[in-house]
Image (tube, helix red, strand yellow):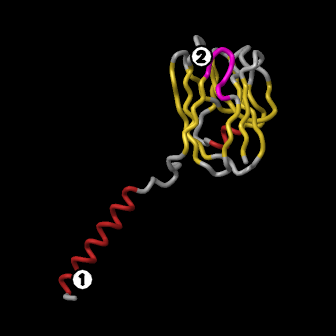
């Protein structure tokens, strides 16, 4: 093989390698994964149970078909009207911000979805296996039964 053909082959391999690096996901951002659709309405989530694997990247796609605003919070040790003392969602989405709404100060992180609207959040499932609860802590919603389960196995 001539020096010219070796040089051309090396350049071609370098270009392929650079293209592969450019197409790879950016560091610090979760890779695309499975999409789980959650429908919100007065006063329920559908489905009521979702199952995920530790370390899995999941996009939760929320659609609020109700007439009222709803939210999604997840964890353990619920405090009605406030959220979860043990916040699972914050561990799954560290960049999610704490929120307050109309004077309600919530424990932990949550995703608010206006009536007749949608939203999505991508998370990486924490490594701890077990069952966690999710719920809507807008005043009266949790108490009316707006909650479900996340099973990590």
Nearer-N-terminus badge (1/2): 1
Residue 80: percent from left, percent from top: 79, 21
Residue 151: percent from left, percent from top: 73, 41
Q: Secondary structure at mark 1?
A: helix
Side of 48 relative to 11 (left or right) = right
Side of 100 relative to 148 (left or right) = left
Q: Is residue 114 magenta?
A: no
| Image quadrant where residue 91 sits | top right
* In the rendered image, the vertical position of residue 74 relative to residue 17, given as above or below: above
- What range of the chain is rendered magenta? 40-47
Look at 56% across and 28% down and name the residue there: 62
Give the camera-side residue of 119 and 66: 66
* In the rendered image, the vertical position of residue 25 relative to residue 61, given as above or below: below
Look at 66% across and 39% down and name the residue there: 90
| Image quadrant where residue 8 sits | bottom left
Look at 63% across and 31% down and name the residue there: 98
- Circle 2 sits on which residue? 69
* In the rendered image, the vertical position of residue 79 relative to residue 144, given as above or below: below
Quadrant in which the N terminus appears: bottom left
Main SS class of the magenta portion in the image: strand
- Circle 1 sits on which residue? 6
């Amino acid at each position: 093989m001539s020096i010219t053909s070796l040089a051309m082959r090396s350049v071609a391999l370098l270009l392929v390698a650079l293209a592969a690096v450019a197409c790879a996901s950016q560091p610090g951002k979760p890779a695309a994964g499975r999409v789980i659709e959650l429908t919100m309405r007065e006063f329920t989530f559908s489905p009521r149970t979702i199952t995920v694997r530790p370390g899995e990247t999941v996009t939760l796609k929320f659609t609020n078909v109700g007439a009222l605003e709803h939210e999604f919070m997840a964890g353990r040790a619920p405090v009605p009207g406030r959220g979860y003392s043990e916040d699972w969602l914050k561990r799954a989405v560290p960049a999610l911000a704490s929120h307050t709404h109309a004077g309600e100060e919530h424990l932990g992180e949550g995703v608010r979805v206006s009536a007749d609207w949608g939203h999505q959040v991508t998370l990486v499932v924490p490594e701890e296996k077990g069952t966690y609860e999710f719920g809507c802590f807008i005043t009266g919603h949790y108490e009316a039964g707006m909650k479900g389960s996340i099973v990590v196995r």
